[in-house]
Amino acid sequence: MVGIKDLGVGIGWRSEIDLTVERLPGVDFVEVVAENLHIGHLPESVTLLLERGVPVLPHAVSLSLGGADPVDLHRVEHLGAVAEAVGAPMVSDHVCFVRAGGLDSGHLMPVPRTKDALDVLVANVKLAQANLPVPLALENVAALLEWPDGELSEGQFLAELVERTDCWLLVDVANLYANARNIGTDPERFLDEIPLERLAYVHVAGGEQHGDIYHDTHAHAVLPEVLEVLDELCSRVAPPGVLLERDDNYPSDTEIATELAAIRAVVDKHRG
Amino acid sequence: MATPTEARDTRVSPEQVGYLAGGPQRAAETALARLLDAGLVRVSRNGVVSAVHETDLGVTTAVETGILVNLRQPVRFEPVVRKAGGSAEMRALYQQLRAQRLMRTPRPRLGAWWVFLAIGVVLALAALLQPWTLLGAIGFLAFAYWSYGAKPLTKAGRAVLEAVDADDRVLTVAVEGFRGRIRNQAVGDLFGLPQSVVKTLPRKKKPRRGKGRGAASSAGAGCGAGGGCGSSGCGSSSSSSCGGGGSSCGGGGGGSN
Ligand SMILES: [Fe+2]
């Protein structure tokens, strides 16, 4: 795959705001949570967007590719089937694990940044790729903790993952900002270290500070600081696409449109 | 379209117009339409209504406040309308309309009202020869008048409805309901609502007689207007169940529900 070119600015499609997504100006593409879709019974709104020519990208949250458990190939197959149903050029999940020992965390848990953990992740990613009809992009997560004995920075970890699996990167600048606030990640160093030529697209989301912790809630407004990280990224590479994630406490159509416009302004600033 | 908070007749709000035109359920539809129009709630394709986050500042009526309070968790379209139609706020709205002498307690028409009229007329004619029958004539004519029944809208209420010019989408809902049509367009389309959502509401009754906007409106408020119908359930399930008589519950050409 040569890469996705000019996806534009998009928004995460959610059933609660389906009509909003349909009528919002300036939605160039959408992302759907693959686990929420049923093959053979796509939501009417998704079908309508496809008919309009809006690209629909499946985003998974349950492959748990960073886990030591065997990859659940049924989940991979479902993701692939969703991709085929919507004609997606790629799919994505996260660099994380969500279950272990039969327990489900309910959260996207960070992977220990050790060589051993990377080996496990690489093996799982390769297995998933072999069972997917389209390329796979992997997203950096927001972490509230760092496992001990890490051997690589987050950027180095992702760079090596890309090198060994040829996967694509989905960079979430809100997660990057959250990690900078919570665990001291340096966003600029992160952006220096990852192979930006393998950037599939970018996530932007809102959150809020609770005491000492910044929570990547996807239920609050996008902070200017997050847009600054996007700005930093755009100063290095023209992202093929940037997508706003909003999962709860949905604001008015006007507010959502304003956030999309703010994202577009940052992207366009660097396109001259 | 502009967001109206009052109908042309400044004494009545769109909600009140809705009540006059179609009873408590229509008034509830109107309140929901106003909230949609103001961007305070949204509806999804699968018919789930949710409050727009942190934007309850534009609420203008108690019924609207009641709807938003019930939308702390998303609720399906039809129950939102049904619950608002049966709310204490809606009963207060009805009392306002009564206080404004736009509505009154409806009285069902007795099927045999004309028999009392005929007897009264005969006795009145007989009074020309036998004056003592005049007393009976008066009694029968009075009873005929009473048994003829009374529609829930007063003359003033009907006049308000006649004067309504539904030139914006909220007033259009008040007059026609979400399930109605105006100028060959489904009213729900004015709000971008899928028909699958709109059709979860009870079907709008066709007028049995009369024609035109005024006629359709004049009896529409029957359901829910009277104490019997109250605001409990006419619109929601069986509009004929309230009041029993034809005129009190959508009979006589009501546009309600
Ligand atoms: Fe994300």
Image (cartoon, grey):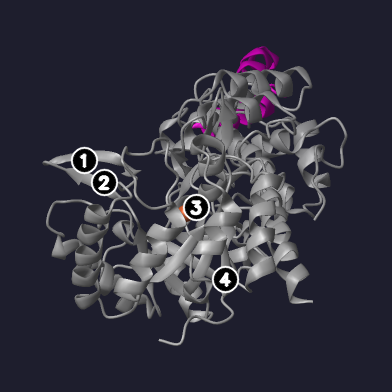
Q: CA distance from mark 4 to mark 2?
A: 26 Å
Please tell me which residue is depicted at 33% across the width and 54% down the height of the picture. Answer: A61
* Residue A84 in view here: yes
Q: Report the residue marked by disc 2.
A: A98
Q: Quadrant of the N terminus of chain A?
A: bottom left
Mark 1 crowdedness (10 Å alpha carbons): few <14, some 14-19, many ≥20 = few
Is B208 on the left-hand or right-hand side of A132? right
**Residue A197: % across, % down:** 51, 77
Q: Is the residue marked 4 within 8 Å of ligand 1, measured from its CB? A: no
Question: Element at badge 4?
Answer: strand
The residues colored magenta run B111-139
Please tell me which residue is depicted at 75% across the width and 27% down the height of the picture. Answer: B102
Please tell me which residue is depicted at 75% across the width and 64% down the height of the picture. Answer: A265
Please report contact status of discs 1 and 2: CB closer than 8 Å, yes or no.
Answer: yes
Judged by depth in the image, the label closer to the viewer, 4 or 3, is 4
Is A91 on the left-hand or right-hand side of A119? right
Labels 4 and 1: the sequence-earlier one: 1
Q: CA distance from mark 1 to mark 3?
A: 30 Å
Labels 4 and 2: the sequence-earlier one: 2
Q: Report the residue marked by disc 1.
A: A104
Q: Report the residue marked by disc 4.
A: A241
Mark 2 crowdedness (10 Å alpha carbons): few <14, some 14-19, many ≥20 = many
Q: Chain of mark 4?
A: A
Q: CA distance from mark 4 to mark 3?
A: 26 Å
Q: Do badges 4 and 1 share one subunit? A: yes
Q: Amino acid at mark 4?
A: Gly
